[in-house]
Amino acid sequence: MKLSTVRLGQRLTWGVVKDQHFYDAGLVLQKTYADLKAAIAAGLAGVEEAANSAAAVSLDQVEWLPVIPNPPKILCVGLNYETHRKETGRSEVENPTIFARYANSQTGHLQPIIRPKVSTELDFEGELAVIISRPGRYISREDALSHVAGYACYNDGSIRDFQRHTHQFTPGKNFPDTGAFGPWMVTPDEMGPLDSLRLQTRLNGQVVQEALFSHMIFDIQRQIEYCSSFTGLEAGDVIVSGTPGGVGAKRNPPLWMKPGDTVEVEIDNIGILTNRIVDEV
């Protein structure tokens, strides 16, 4: 299934995307699940049946929100492709580099990514997002993928000068409306094996990043194993799994996103996450 969170008129809801339509499972199951996160925690029980009984809504009538607007945690993996590690000049490490993003820094598909007043160094980072299905602590590598509810496109938009203020990434990674998440998540049964799948980021139609998931330094199983060693993972948590080389900050001259630009993150078997860039007002 493809699952998304949207706004229909004044109502926030969630449901299933298929055949170029949205099916409002959230309305059918409103007495059972408060939101998509709650449905995921229940193993998506009854969701497909609810979607089959829901009215079809054309996709151009929905306002896309982050797939999980209210994740308990967003854990981001830095420097997780060799091409990106090398372009930053960072040393090899034995464990994933983890930083946190806040839920209120996110935005949805076809919504603007906002360049803040205090910086012009807004960079793109196309990534694969992993949505956690059930709680776990000290999850083994062998059991890791059984804790995955689905996958989505993510653009971990970064304010590079704020990121470089100290060795801590947090400020540059949490400006409002910089983390794009969507349009939907795809359940693992429709995703297939990850290694041969491609991620591509395009800025105004130009390919700026491209990689296979087999190019990750730490694969999804290792990320789940490691993150669950220092915090208990919960249903609806999001792990943003790292970006390939080609980021704007490491080009000569640097390539920053600016108002009027369009950025796309495309992942095989998921689709395309598209956002335009606007200035903060």
Image: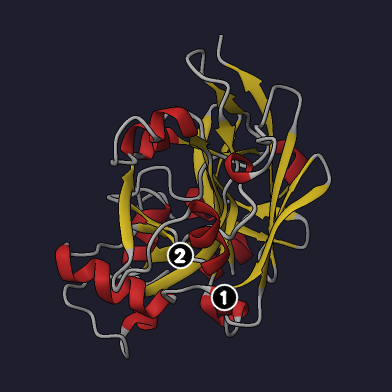
For residue 215, which numbered disc appears in the image? 1
Q: Quadrant of the C terminus?
A: top right
Name which quarter of the figure residue 231 lies in: bottom left
Tell me the amino acid under the disc marked 1: His
- Judged from this view, the residue extending furthest toward the right is 205
Coordinates of residue 102 in the picture (x, y in percent): 34, 39
Q: How is the image coloured?
A: secondary structure
Coordinates of residue 22 in the picture (x, y in percent): 67, 52
Q: Is residue 92 visible?
A: yes
Query: Residue beneath label 2, please?
Result: 80
Q: Is residue 180 above or below residue 246?
A: above
Name which quarter of the figure residue 69 lies in: top left
Asked if the residues shown at circle 1 and circle 2 are in contact, with their CB atoms under 8 angstroms apart, the answer is no
Q: Is residue 174 visible?
A: no
Coordinates of residue 144 in the picture (x, y in percent): 33, 81
Coordinates of residue 98 in the picture (x, y in percent): 31, 56
Tell me the amino acid under the disc marked 2: Asn
